[in-house]
Amino acid sequence: MKKSWSMNQVPSNPNSNGAPNSNAGGAGNAASGTGSSPTFSPLYQQIKALITQSLQSGEWKPGELIPSEVELAGRYKVSQGTVRKAIDELAAENLVVRRQGKGTFVATHNEARAHFRFLKLMPDEGVSQHPDHQYVEVKRIRAAAEVARLLDLKSGDAVVYIKRVMSFDGVPTILEELWLPGQLFKGLTAERLAEYKGPMYGLFESEFGTRMIRATEKIRAVAADASAAEYLKVPEGTPLLCADRVSFTYGDKAVELRRGLYLTSSFHYQNELS
Amino acid sequence: MKKSWSMNQVPSNPNSNGAPNSNAGGAGNAASGTGSSPTFSPLYQQIKALITQSLQSGEWKPGELIPSEVELAGRYKVSQGTVRKAIDELAAENLVVRRQGKGTFVATHNEARAHFRFLKLMPDEGVSQHPDHQYVEVKRIRAAAEVARLLDLKSGDAVVYIKRVMSFDGVPTILEELWLPGQLFKGLTAERLAEYKGPMYGLFESEFGTRMIRATEKIRAVAADASAAEYLKVPEGTPLLCADRVSFTYGDKAVELRRGLYLTSSFHYQNELS
DNA sequence: AAGTGGTCTAGACCACTTT
DNA sequence: AAGTGGTCTAGACCACTTC
């Protein structure tokens, strides 16, 4: 562990023995002499990176309690306030969840509160019933060029392909196709998917150790082709909302491609601009 | 100003004279005896509310420098750290912008960095040229029931109605309709709109004193009707992305309704899920 | 009672900007 | 040199949860 901040923990009381920080009194950031770019980063960002590493490595698993702020402060030899600021940012990014009096927990998709973070389709009015999932196709294929490029694979690498229909109150509403790196999702079958209760990202995280952190979506309006029309039971040419998603796990690594076709006659894509 | 937090600014050194806080030594939050709900809020939230009031009242206008943290701490009789936390949240909500070494500024829509906060339509590849705006219709009408309800007006109240077409590289791409409370936008004409350089929200904020803070959008796929088809120069029935927006100013007050029809053949609605 | 996160203060130093 | 926001520390107390 390197800390590039220096000369800043010299409290008024002159009892700073016990090595309060590994580089106390060190040369400092000012990189005297060299013309290179020293690439600073604040201490709390370094602590944040270390905590993220522990999350990524599985030292603390989704749903589990992470060490207390006091304990982490001791481990990293920084003040509790610095750990707090690091965890504040991790909480803002939905990587951990704070619970007063209990502790800080690793965020998980197997929670009610996480259900609508990646599912932005809402019923126009009322509350949607639990959806039915029908898995049309689950197979391993070879990555086409475009899929390989987006998933950072080589053309022809193994990819899990999934096609499913989601219905609300018996009405087919979403037709989805997914592409996942075969390497990460060995043993993913239609049965595993169908029998799993809860969101698919919960299955991915608990059974395959891949946690989706964030995603980007490009949204368009398209006309239903013959295939989509059949699955969604609408006339060919019906306007559908098409969302192309790329999902990322730790380290901004793309690990899911998803194309969703949404029938928006009684549902809408809800977005908050702020 | 009321502060419901108490008994917490009693530093170790016993020199706490000069009334460091108006309720130092007060009865405290514990609401002993009464069974009512005292509705606490942390000091920094109260400070945040006070700063927001000053923003709303126009004491500090968009683009201007607000008082320094030290000065605000003195004004509100709290520590700089508490002011800092209040401003941190305001910055996270894009109400203010911090600039190291210079100060904290009131956020404004007349800035390059704000251009894409409410304009989520992106070209599929490359960079969009500056769009042309053609104002089809700008008139004052009476609010229909639905418009009145969403804008918190009475049916029949005056409303400014705007219809415009945005083209990129000469290609009509967006057809927008807006409804604004007539009370707030007196003197808004097609000429004022057409001659204004920069985003419309910049005009609203600098000329009409109404600043858009956040918005919600419901997005659907629809088929172009005869009118939309004509304006966008596409066949009737062409799939269009329809975004229904409600925008809010300070105090969560709705002050704009907007329906955008987007031609997404070479543009897409870009969204980040996190 | 003990442990946890949440709030608040006070003071130090750093990095950046302007005078 | 002076002023601003940015980082870091240390210590206090509060609210909530568990034992």
Image: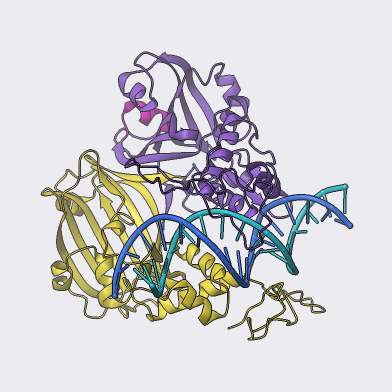
Chain colours: A purple, B yellow, C blue, D cyan
Query: Is residue B274 shown left or right of residue A17?
Result: left
Q: Do we see residue A240 in this rendering?
A: yes
Q: Is residue A230 above or below residue A273?
A: above
Q: Main secondary structure of the magenta part?
A: helix
Residue B108 in the image: state x and y as whole percent.
32, 67
- Nearer to the camera, A177 or B109: B109
Instruction: Give whichever of B120, B44 is nearer the camera.
Output: B44
Q: Which residues are magenta?
A: A224-234
Reply above or below: B103 against A15. Answer: below
Question: Seen in the image, is B251 located left or right of residue B122?
Answer: right
Q: For this rendering, which residue is in front, A167 or B83? A: B83
Q: Quadrant of residue B28?
A: bottom right
Quadrant placement of the N terminus of chain B = bottom right
Residue drawn at x 36%, y 69% is B105
Relative side of A193 to A100, left or right: left
Which residue reaches farthest bottom? B18
Q: Can you give x and y, in whole percent of width and height, for residue B239 in the image?
A: 27, 42
Front residue (pair A93, A3): A3
Residue ID at (21%, 76%):
B188
| Vertical relation: A248 (above or below) D14 | above
Counting from the top left corner in percent of width and height, residue B43 is at: 61, 72
